[in-house]
Amino acid sequence: MRDGGGVTFPGARRPDRRYVVDSAGVGLAVGEWGDPDAPPLLLAHGGFDFVGTYDGFAPRLAEGGRRVVAWDQRGHGDSDRAALYSWAADLRDTVAVLDSLGDVGPVPLVGHSKGGGMLLEVAEALPHRVSHMVNLDGLPSSRAQPDRPDHERTRMLSGELAGWLDHRRAAAGKARRPGTIGELAARRGRMNPRLSEAWLRYLVTVGGYEDEDGWRWKIDPGLRMGGFGPWRPEWSLIRLPGLRMPFLGILAAQPEVMGWGTRPEDLEPYLPVGAEIESWADAGHFVHIEFPDRAAERVLTFLAAHP
Amino acid sequence: MTPTLLDHGRVRLALHTLRDGDGPNLLLLHPLAESSPATVPDDVAVWPGPVHALDFTGHGQSTVPVGGGYTAELLMGDADLALAHLGPTAVLGRGLGAYIALMIAGARPDLVRGAVLDDGAGLAGGGDSPGSVYIPPPITTDGTSPDPWALTDLSRDLRPADYATAFVRLALQFSGLDNPVSVAARFRPPWITAVAAEPGVRECSVEEALAAYASV
């Protein structure tokens, strides 16, 4: 197995440093960009993404004077494939990475999609450790959220339950389907229709590995899109009014398959005092990939405005 | 007797046969932090066929995985591995196992020939709606059973009433049974109160429920 297919993308840069953080026995692959002595910023990716999806966005934050720390969630990217996955475990893993930064004081948290939702709960549980909260299209409305397995309000369809159980029955020994870089890029393109083929090909080479029979995504084949569970999207918002750290939420107005479709008016009842919410009319769900310069600039401006 | 080993992802589950023989199957699902009984419990003795018992992930002789991450849905998957091996069976769940018995009865209505929900540890879970967020610090585990992470995760998972009743409705619609779910539990957290009020759910003793399902 080797990674890195020699594919590059303009402005994309692999982490400057990589290491592993232990979370109760699960090894989490961490990547950092920027001056190791600069003030840290924690960056959380969305479901079925990985550190490499920040290869465009993170270096731009680092150039703005930040030590940017991201990690592959369990089962994603280069982190361990765990026996079990859950929202609660993802939150514990998040705190393990935060703890690994040492005595750095309150830290800005920036999360996309599922990662944004996770960081909201970290801020609610540990507000003393969070200086700023930035959420990139990770604020739910009551509509479906396809990249939040095990943590969304169920559509209780009999076929969906049976399909999930069939997947679990076959989970032992499951492998991802191999293919060429172009084939994997095309498959991912169906979930990321607004992203360029050049970017998707780059992602294959940082989020996949090459074996004798072709490339495969590194993500645990036991993980499955969709899913069901007792969680209701609005429950992710009920404690939002209690947050007191500076808060920036960016919503993506362009509808797409992985998108959340949340509108500013959906959030109005829940916004904390002083929250800044903006909807980007020209952006899809992956705002930081579509517009890395603008997204990084907006985050850095927000941090500078609330020193 | 040596248990049958079933692979659920990276977890190896132990399925025990407490009593072999002919007739309808009964599968026992244990409470939180317990494990399969060594012998057929007294209140199950009336069952006319084979009696099996599954150790959930992190319990009994099943794998204790690293790093936690338990959900009730995952344990429903455990139960489904047992169904894949046994074929049609009645299910008797206690505590946490009662919640899992309800879920699998709705999700595999063709295989679960009656679900009995009885008292036991882990019946309530973490209630029916979110409380304060708490992210527990790491637990040091040495692989012994029951897994402390299972106790942490499965005493905090939310069990909304309308989520539970959705499984009752699936069981009633697709099992072909008039009373696919029986509630014997006397402790009534919100989800089980709601389940007991659903059409197709009978409130009765374990013995009465088993007698009814034995003739299905």
Image (cartoon, helix red, strand yellow):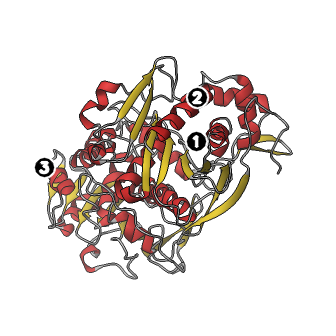
Percent x, y of residue A79: 64, 56
Q: Which residue is mark 3?
A: B197
Chain for numbered disc 2: A
Percent x, y of residue B173: 28, 39
- Secondary structure of the residue carrying numbered label 1: loop
- Are the two marked residues, 2 and 1, in contact with CB atoms closer than 8 angstroms? yes
Crowding around mark 1 (Cα neighbors within 10 Å: few <14, some 14 to 19, many 20+) is many
- Are the two marked residues, 3 and 2, in contact with CB atoms closer than 8 angstroms? no
> Is residue A152 among what the camera can see?
yes
Q: Residue type at mark 3: give it.
A: Ala
Depth check, front residue: B126 or B19: B126
Q: Residue type at mark 2: give it.
A: Met
Depth check, front residue: B118 or A204: A204
Q: Which residue is mark 1?
A: A48
Chain for numbered disc 3: B
> Residue A191 shows which numbered tag?
2
Percent x, y of residue A271: 29, 37
Left or right: where A285 falls relative to B111: right
